[in-house]
Image: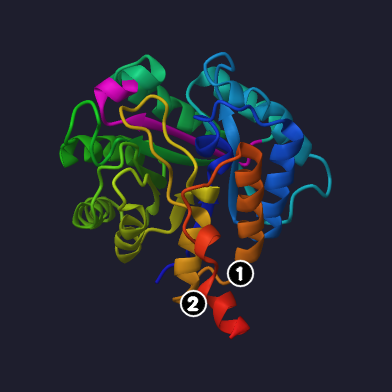
Amino acid sequence: MKEIIIHEVGLRDGLQIEKQTVPLEKKIEWVDVLLAAGIGIVQLGSFVNPEKVPQMADTDKLFGHYRQPGKKPQGALLSGLVLNEKGLERGMACGVDMFCMGVSASDTHSRKNTGKGTEEAAAQIVAMAQAAMKAGKRVQASIQSAFGCGFEGPIPAERVLGIVDRYLAAGVRNISLADTAGHAYPPQVESLYAEIRRRDPQVELACHFHNTYGLGLANCYAAMRAGVTYYESALGGLGGCPFTKVAAGNVCTEDLVHSLQREGLAVGIDLEKLLAASRSLAAFFGRELPGFILKAGSIARLQKAQ
């Protein structure tokens, strides 16, 4: 079993679809709890047009806050999503530790998300990834709609693997498959990751599942069996791509951590701190969140109380 690393994307993928804008101070409060809980990678936001995604208007300021001495625990990584060269330039200027960028395997989704088709977007992202790596930054390159698309339906594995080959040829060794539409199912997940590992046994694999059809956590376990290291999830199960057909939340971070800890994994993460952050999220938005452990409570805590 490889090391399991949780990559919290709630501040980006979780908030981008929300109508109620979150103040910078509240974001900092949530990030501080996530870092104190021992989450290895926290995605602070995306460098996009604030008119299109108002929630991300303060991403530069958020990174600026954590550049100050003592604001970030040693060893923690702060990631940011970039879609184009301008976003990469902004991220470089404000101190992003790890750049996340990607291409959709669905041409329709790609055009709705970035205004470019898959081929044009792939050429742009590969060039950006190489520029970031040359500057000494960590890079994770993703393939969105890797398991299916709400607009186009099934996505051929060959199309996904063709993008993987371009990433590998460019020297990218951290590759994420994103289930943007939530169409993935466990055997498909294992099969596709196995094909990537055949191409490069040393590649670092990441996953990003949405819970649109209730299979998010099951797909995480399929990814685990396939040797995936990085698991992207969101506090409370918030999220959903605003440019896909049926937007639904991410795998819930505290649900994933709770499940892993029952197997003796992710034991360095403080689940109670995560639950406190999720309660704060629920209070801020004034509604119940999709996560289960927030409602039912931790089994470990229940057993201690008995």
Assign the N terminus to one quadrant of the image: bottom left
Is residue 266 visible in the rendered image? The answer is: yes
Is residue 97 in the magenta section? yes
Which element type, helix, strand or loop, lies under badge 2? loop
User: Residue at the bottom extreme?
Assistant: 306
Percent from the top left, x then y, of residue 134? 54, 34
Question: What residue sits right under mark 2 in the picture?
Answer: 264
> What residue type is disc 2 on?
Gly
Residue visible at 25% across and 47% down in the picture: 184
Q: Label 1 amino acid?
A: Gly
Give percent across and percent down for residue 279. 63, 52
Magenta part of the chain? 96-110
Quadrant position of residue 191:
bottom left
Q: Is residue 136 visible?
A: no
Q: Is residue 33 above or below residue 181?
A: below
The residue wearing badge 1 is: 268
